[in-house]
Image: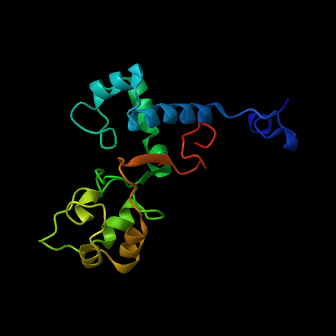
Amino acid sequence: MKSWSDICQPKRCGGLGLRKFQDMNLALLAKQYWMILQKEDKACVHIMLSKYCHSTDAWDVEKHGGDLRGWQGLLATRLICHDGAGFLIGNGDIEMWDRPWIPRKSIEEIKLSFKYNRRHAFWKVSDLFLDGTKAWNEDIIRACFEEEVARSILQIRPLIETNDVLFWKSSNSGKFSVKSA
């Protein structure tokens, strides 16, 4: 007889190399939630978006008591997906206060570094561009953010002629994988 934790050890360590069912279940559910975040063109994604995200975005959707267990399971993986996500800036159409768009900076770090000024009402990343361009408005960025975050923003090179791109940070290809989750 062997314990389950021994069986789940890699083969080179004397186990059978099985994965823990709970971890695998979370990773597979996270893949489904990732597909919803990316708004993939699949029937199951369209159904979930229309049922649960018709009035809000999948990033911001709240859990409700009457939700199906499957949807509750997907929402349980939200933290995994949000922590592993990153955005490459293209047109800057993503929301700046709840999306991971500055490399190596958490959402909380971004919010805490912001210096409030009544003249500045920013919602999207593109609000930090010079009007009509994809070039950063350096004066506004330096006036609104602490130096370290401002420097990080100014180092970002927006993608030419494309939308913002969601990517998975734990993968060299940027594509979500169950193994990396």
In depth, the one of 125 and 15 nearer the eye is 125
Q: Relative to 132, is 87 on the left or the right? A: right
| Whether residue 78 can be seen here | yes
- 176 vs 163, left or right, is right
The residue that appears at 28% across and 25% down in the rendered structure is: 50
Give above or below for 101 relative to 37.
below
Q: How is the image coloured?
A: rainbow
Q: Residue at x 32, y 28 (%)?
A: 49
Q: Would residue 65 be seen by someone viewing this image from the given angle?
A: no
Q: Where the N terminus falls, by quadrant?
A: top right
Give x and y (percent) for residue 25.
Answer: 57, 31
Q: Nearer the viewer, residue 9 or 154?
A: 154
Q: Position of residue 14 (x, y in %)?
A: 87, 40
The percent coordinates of residue 54 (x first, y second) are 24, 30
What x and y, as percent, mark residue 104? Answer: 48, 64
Dividing the picture into quadrants, the one containing residue 128 is bottom left
Residue drawn at point x = 36 percent, y = 80 percent: 147
Q: Quadrant of residue 154?
A: bottom left
